[in-house]
Image (spheres, rainbow, N blue to C red):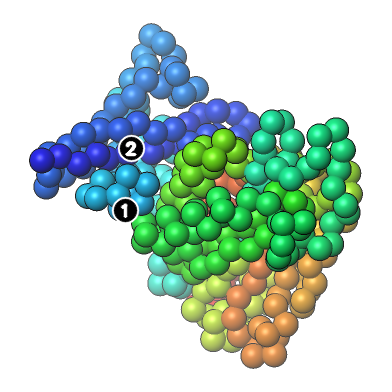
């Protein structure tokens, strides 16, 4: 007997990397071996030295094929054993280990937009739907499209054992959101990439593409973000640590560093309108969705909890955003003795 292992990795496409995958048939009970691929076809190598290496780092049941089949998330390495330049997971790992004692938790809210025939799913040919307002968490065929795809994706994530915590319709027709977490930096990021894979793969079956474009429809429409919720043990136990984390994200040099790593097209989305703060002005506030970082009202009331960085784009690399936030906030909390 045999099972199928779908090897999944992040390619070198610029400016926004894509997921790639291929299938390996293995004997029942076999370990997941390293494998190779043609990096010259994925923007990760030149033709004269094209071999790249896939190293499995996370696997889960394959909810599409079922049975004993697996989905296998891989890191990309060069043939000489060094991490490939596109391997952002390898950069997160030492940060995760350095601050492991602070017990960082992340929750990422992944917004995305369905497209069909070159326009957002649900947009009329050559025109626009009514203005945004009724679509967010909407109910009914006149307000919501794509729910059949979304429900199938949710079930697939649950069946795969991913830490998916919810779904909702977003502010534009054809736009939805799912949430991954709470989980540690590596686990949250691995599960997010796997959930993205399932989203793309299931949408394919419906003849629809799911996109992470930060501004999928120009004009008076919200963009698509990946709001990132973060806490450490100290933040979950006291409010002073909450303020320290917020202040650290606005420290000299940090705003530019984070914005540079928060996804492609961020200037188009973070305009100061449509529930965003300007990309080049840092702010934080309680219950303020127009701030860079929001402190939920319940957190201020309880004097403990988490913060929400509202700046990351939908197309952000989870390994990058978790690394940046953990490194900035945990370093500041350590210096302040709030660990």
Task: Measure the C-alpha gap from mark 1 to mark 2.
Answer: 11 Å
Position of the N terminus, as image quadrant, is top left
Task: Give percent across and percent down for residue 144.
Answer: 71, 56
Q: Which is more N-terminal, label 2 or label 1?
A: 2
| Quadrant position of residue 52 | top left
Frontmost residue, 93 versus 187: 187
Frontmost residue, 153 versus 194: 153
Frontmost residue, 74 versus 148: 148
Element on which disc 2 rests? strand
Give the answer, above or below, for where 262 lies relative to 296.
above
Asked if residue 21 lies left or right of residue 124, the reply is: left
Give the answer, above or below, for where 35 lies relative to 265.
above
Asked if residue 43 lies left or right of residue 291, the reply is: left
Q: Residue at (33%, 37%) from the top-left corner?
A: 7
Frontmost residue, 191 versus 94: 191
- Return the residue at label 1: 60
- Return the residue at label 2: 7
Give the answer, above or below, for where 75 lies relative to 294.
above
Q: Are marks 1 and 2 in contact (CB under 8 Å)?
A: no
Quick check: can you spot residue 257? no
């Amino acid at each position: 007997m045999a099972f199928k292992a779908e090897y999944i990795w992040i390619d070198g496409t610029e400016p926004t990397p894509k997921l790639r995958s291929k299938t390996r048939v293995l004997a029942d009970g076999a370990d997941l071996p390293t494998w190779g691929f043609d990096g010259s076809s994925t923007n990760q190598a030149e033709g004269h030295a094209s071999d790249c290496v896939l190293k499995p780092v996370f696997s889960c049941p394959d909810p599409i094929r079922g049975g004993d089949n697996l989905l296998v998330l891989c890191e990309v390495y060069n043939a000489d054993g060094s991490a490939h330049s596109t391997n952002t997971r390898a950069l997160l790992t030492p940060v995760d280990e350095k601050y492991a004692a602070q017990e960082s938790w992340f929750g990422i809210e992944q917004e995305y937009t369905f497209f069909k025939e070159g326009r957002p799913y649900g947009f009329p040919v050559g025109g626009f739907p009514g203005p945004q307002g009724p679509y967010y968490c909407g109910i009914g065929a006149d307000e919501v499209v794509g729910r059949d795809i979304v429900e199938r994706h949710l079930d697939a994530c649950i069946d795969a054992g991913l830490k998916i915590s919810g779904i909702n319709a977003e502010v534009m027709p054809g736009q939805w959101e799912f949430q991954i977490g709470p989980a540690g930096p590596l686990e949250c990021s691995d599960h997010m990439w796997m959930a993205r894979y399932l989203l793309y793969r299931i949408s394919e079956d419906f003849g629809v593409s799911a996109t992470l474009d930060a501004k999928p429809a120009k004009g008076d429409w919200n963009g698509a973000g990946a709001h990132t919720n973060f806490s450490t043990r100290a933040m979950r136990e006291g409010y002073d640590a909450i303020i320290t984390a917020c202040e650290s994200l606005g420290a000299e040099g940090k705003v530019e560093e984070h914005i540079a790593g928060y996804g492609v097209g961020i200037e188009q989305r973070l305009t100061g309108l449509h529930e965003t703060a300007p990309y080049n002005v840092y702010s934080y506030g309680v219950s303020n969705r127009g701030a860079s970082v929001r402190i939920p009202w319940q957190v201020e009331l309880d004097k403990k909890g988490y913060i929400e960085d509202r700046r990351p784009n939908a197309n952000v690399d989870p390994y990058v955003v978790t690394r940046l936030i953990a490194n900035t906030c945990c370093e500041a909390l350590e210096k302040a003795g709030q660990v």
